[in-house]
Image (cartoon, grey):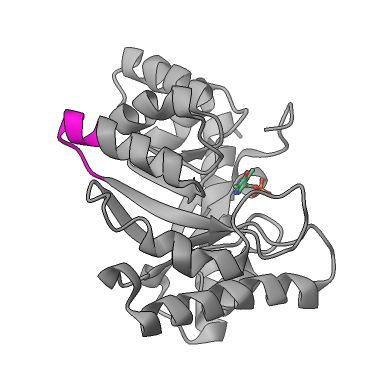
Amino acid sequence: MTEEAELADRIDAVRRRIAGACARAGRDPDGVRLLPVSKTQPFQVLAQAARLGIVRFGENRVQEMANKDAGLRELGLQVQWALTGPLQSNKVRDVAALASEFQALESVRIAEALQRRLTAAGRRLDVMIEVNTSQESAKHGLDPAEVPDFAARLAPYDALNVTGLMTVAANTPDQRVIAGCFQTLVDLQARLRDAGTLGSAWDELSMGMSGDFELAIEHGATVVRVGTAIFGARQTQG
Ligand SMILES: *Cc1c(COP(=O)(O)O)cnc(C)c1O
């Protein structure tokens, strides 16, 4: 089998597992978006995926996203980018210019910098607030208790379209612990909706990765971020 056929098979297999999880949960599969996470993969692999119909890729590092964007453009391919990793202020300009969504907002200072760049560029950006639902100190994201106040402070930044919440669940084989992380995000979404915070619908719940996306769908994920189950093992830590 060619590399491209293998990639097509793995994408199909993930889509079938998403459909299966939706069926078990009584959910419409159209309500779950697959975001392939291509960090550490060379842009030639992204080119193959793009030719198979993948239009948006998740990346964790801005410089890597910008390099791949340039590589793909040279091949005549234009794709969309979702930044799923932390953003430093010196990279805000690239994100404002290149990204379609930023799933890891956790700082008002970055929100303000994005607002400035986006306004100058005449663009808006979909953003999600990253929440640390695992209480693992190495994880990014805000403590759930901090999120309502943080969300309210985003109100002045009208170039940011706050679509919902993102989390990375605990790194453990214990399914109950992982499910608890997903449920924390669901409960927080309900709280923000009840409070009418930002007037946003808070529709998006980005949760679930290769090891836990079916469980995430059963808990209400609207975006699953899948890397290794599609692209295989990563060469380096991403
Ligand atoms: C790497 C990464 C993923 C994908 O992880 P896999 O386990 O390879 O599916 C998803 N979300 C974030 C934030 C990541 O950093």
Q: Is residue 22 above or below residue 100?
A: below
Can residue 80 be seen in this snapshot?
Answer: no
Can residue 208 be seen in this snapshot?
Answer: yes
Percent across and percent down for residue 41 are 60, 28
63 part of magenta stretch: no
For the point 38% across and 16% down, the residue is: 70
Question: Closest to the observer: 209 or 49?
Answer: 209
Q: Which quadrant does the C terminus fall into?
A: top right
Percent across and percent down for residue 202 are 37, 70
Q: Quadrant of residue 110?
A: top left
Percent across and percent down for residue 191 are 46, 81
Question: Closest to the observer: 165 or 32?
Answer: 165
For the point 57% across and 84% down, the residue is: 24
Percent across and percent down for residue 131 are 58, 60
Q: Which residues are magenta?
A: 118-124
122 part of magenta stretch: yes
For the point 19% across and 38% down, the residue is: 123
Q: Is residue 211 above or below residue 186?
A: above
